[in-house]
Amino acid sequence: MANGDTAEKIFIGKSDNLAWLTLGLANRHGLATGATGTGKTVSLQIMAEGFARAGVPVFAADIKGDLSGISALGEPKDFILKRAKEMDLDFQPDEFSTVFWDVFGEQGHPVRATVSEMGPLLLARMLDLNDVQEGVLNVAFKIADEEGLPLLDFKDLRSILDAISPADKKRKGDDDSGGGLDDIKTAAQKFGNVTKPTIGTIQRQLLVLENQGGESFFGEPALQLKDFMRTDSAGRGMINILAADKLMTSPRLYATFLLWMLSELFEELPEAGDPPKPKLVFFFDEAHLLFTDAPKALLDKIEQVVRLIRSKGVGVYFVTQNPIDVPDRVLAQLGNRIQHALRAFTPRDQKAVAAAAQTFRPNPKLDTTKVITELGKGEALVSFLEGNGTPAMVERVFIRPPTARMGPITPEERKAIMAKSPVKGKYDKTIDSESAYEMLHKRLTQTAAPVGTPGTDPGVPAPGGGGILDKLTNIVGTIFGTNRPRGQKLSTGQVVARDLARSVTGAVIGGAAAKVGRSVAGSMGGSIGRSIVRGALGGLLKR
């Protein structure tokens, strides 16, 4: 293959020996470390180019904007040609099909998730909540599931928090028929003492996140991860680049967003074992942000996802300054290593260098601890997994030059690439579906018809009716919400029947109906929603 790669391996660098990353072992994850300015971004670009040539889609966060150059044709500059000649490399300038993404929708297509898809654990991490506040947030999600209130965006989350907050006194117009919110407040209290001060603290944290631009991340259309896993017309993997320069001003949002992506990939992808090449490779730059001050529950989730997502054919590569930024139990899962230079100016730095050296399989020809501090720009210590899955001895190598452009592209070039994007128009316009905010607002502003009113309850025939057609009309009306009184809650069986019917209708009709069906289904996703549906469906089938 041109530029040094083969069908089974990616050429990374050369010294006395050639350094190859084996595609069949690339889903065993990896780590690229080194001080600022030592060449981590170039190493990331080298690996991304190799994966793309092999037909493997790539997702990478671009912190400084430098990685965007992978979308433009490389320039045969003198230092690049010199390095290629020293490696006997047939250098050919190249460019790669790229899709740009941006949580804020400024330098790429907007990336969104619904509040329900994010879930209470990751959302609590994003909001920096303590255990008590996280418990109340879990109550809010539980009540939303039980009441059939989809949580899609910020205003939905705020409204359900207001709904479960205990009232100072009974408000005029509230009743026990379901038209008000007394039933929701009562249901919330059965899970423990939900207090107004705790609700107020969560609401203030939501305001902080909103001021950081986090509000733009929650909503619809929600990201479909299959849009990351594309190949271009030449069979090369698409390279997805997340513009993260502005996102880095909200480090918790950045780290939680990328962890959410990994979790969604883990849940959605089927088991693949050890494929000949990965289905997707995921580069997590500034990885220390994921682990800093992370509670044990979150660390357990990270370890679980990293350990198990390998079997889904996804490779995860962490990029950070030092291996000690990554917890040991996660570090043990990262078999492919690239170590750029570290500086040892302080006792802490010296300790970090020693720890980095100990992560490699020793080479009798190298004093690894000493070499780490002597590496020049474009040099690295590498150790990749060999055929039997064990790490190779560490080698000091010169990293090969990229074939695409090194450095950022211009704003005009970015706009031109986005104009030809395969997902152009799919995510660019926000959709505001009916969800918890609208439903709770109706409960407060509309008076529900009494249960059992002739012509509204499927169990009470309308005057002059009562035939099979009328009964069928009433049942369909209940399922689809066309003739049910506002504020009247469905039974568990009716909720399941309604959602199943909507799903079938969406599949048959397609188009807009299918999108609405996905909005409802996505909002009720996650393990809690699935467990509720499974239990309700079992009871329905028994009856």
Image (cartoon, rainbow, N blue to C red):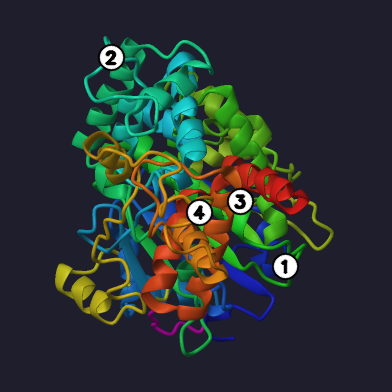
Tag 1 and tag 4, C-beta contact below 8 Å: no
Whether residue 26 is visible here, answered yes or no, is: yes
State the CA–CA distance, disc 4 to disc 2. Answer: 32 Å
Residue at label 1?
24
Amino acid type of disc 3? Gly
Query: Of the residues tagged 1 and 4, which is closer to the observer?
Result: 4
Q: Residues within 10 Å of mark 4 (few under 14, many from 20)?
A: many
Q: Quadrant of residue 528?
A: top right
Determine whether 406 is above or below 140 in the image: below
**Between disc 2 and disc 3, whose residue precedes?**
3
| Residue segment shown in magenta | 89-96
Q: Are marks 3 and 1 in contact (CB under 8 Å)?
A: no
462 with respect to 105 (left or right):
right
Between 352 and 266, the one nearer to me in the picture: 266
Q: Label 4's element? A: loop
Say which residue label 4 marks.
458
Marks 2 and 1, the one that precedes in the sequence: 1
Q: Nearer the viewer, residue 396 or 249?
A: 249
| Inter-mark Cα distance, 2 to 3 | 58 Å
Disc number for residue 170: 2
